[in-house]
Image (spheres, rainbow, N blue to C red):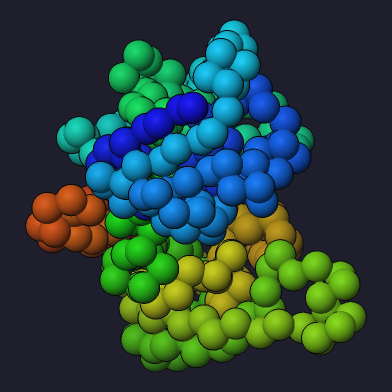
Amino acid sequence: MIERKIGEDSAGQRLDKYVRRLLREVPLSHVYKMFRTRKVRLNGARGRPEELLKAGDVVVVRGDDERLLSAPPAVQPQPRRARVPLRVLFEDDYLMAVEKPAGMAVHPGSGIESATLVDEVRAMLGPRAVHNEFAPSPAHRLDRDTSGIILVAKRRPAMVRLTEIFTAGDATKCYLALAKGQLERARGTIDLPLSEHEQTARSRAERGVNMQPAITHYRVLGKGSGASLLECAIETGRTHQIRRHLLAVGHPIAGDRRYGDFPFNRELKGKFGLKRMFLHARRISVAHPMTGQKMVFEAPLAAELVEVLVRMGIDLPK
């Protein structure tokens, strides 16, 4: 019989995920059979896979300890290193704020061969990376071609709380974007539902396109050479939200290879040297996941984007 008392760093996760990590070499089908046959107990009662663990809970797995735990530890692959190390804006025991360069993916995935933000953070932390079987993980998303701030949870309780904060919309995220054309109003709001980005073909066929609420606020910071520099704040976190919203109102982001105006992109590259998408996560305001203290993190605009603004005659944002 295996018995474990749940500590603070393991709280907040599902029981089945905890048991799967505990029994790494046990086939997944057998793990869930143990749930069905009541061999997994939580605080003396039958354990259910979806239950969320709390500090102080006692998990018991009935079986032969030696057979369940004797497998050798899995060999961890060496993380790939980035060409440009991440700039750390803030770090404590629970949280890191880092500046992601444009072109770096946040998570590993198919077709991604270069180092990701996850790879780089874990390599930077070295032996400190894993804490009670939790490896540092980004608490929110940022497009591969977007530069700027990413918050990384270093311990599980911080990840659980940050997920709650971002899901509830209690964090303020501001971006800088260079958009085609000149917007009529100095301030505005784009309240336009967007289709679910990851909806399956089967779901679309059965239910139709799933439209999700999406709200983006913008403020014009400067104008020049047929473009506008905007500060954008999002209430919702839909995939590619700012890029899709600005395209919908006729002002796509400069350098955007997916939603942009391609002749406009070529013109800006030739005249002003813009070689990437002009979208930068400038500021995040959020409560610290453990102390609740309000924190504001800022990342200055990348040097190559500053040079483009200077060449276009647009004043730098303050």
In percent of width and height, residue 247 lies at 63, 76
In the picture, measured across the screen, residue 34 lies left or right of residue 183, that is: right
Measuring 56% from the left and 53% from the top, which residue is drawn there? 49
Q: Is residue 52 above or below residue 185?
A: above
- Out of 234 and 44, give the one closest to the viewer: 44
Q: Is residue 170 left or right of residue 268?
A: left
Rendered image quadrant of residue 113: top right
| Residue 146 % position (x, y) | 51, 50
On the rendered structure, is 111 left or right of 159?
right
Which residue appears at 71% of the width and 60% of the height?
A: 258
In the rendered image of this protein, does residue 51 appear above or below residue 220? above
Q: State whether residue 123 is above or below residue 104.
A: above
Residue nearer the viewer, 284 or 62: 62
**In the rendering, at what x and y percent does residue 25 appear?**
65, 22
Q: Nearer the viewer, residue 143 or 93?
A: 93
Q: From this viewpoint, is residue 161 visible? A: yes
* Pick the front one: 270 or 186: 186
Q: Position of residue 48 (x, y in %)?
A: 54, 56
Q: Residue at x 87, y 72 (%)?
A: 202
Q: Is residue 318 above or below residue 206?
A: above
Residue 309 appearing in the image: no
Report the residue at 67% width, 74% height from top.
Answer: 196
- Looking at the rendered image, the quarter that the C terminus falls into is bottom left
* Total marks placed: 0
* Residue 175 in which image quadrant: bottom left
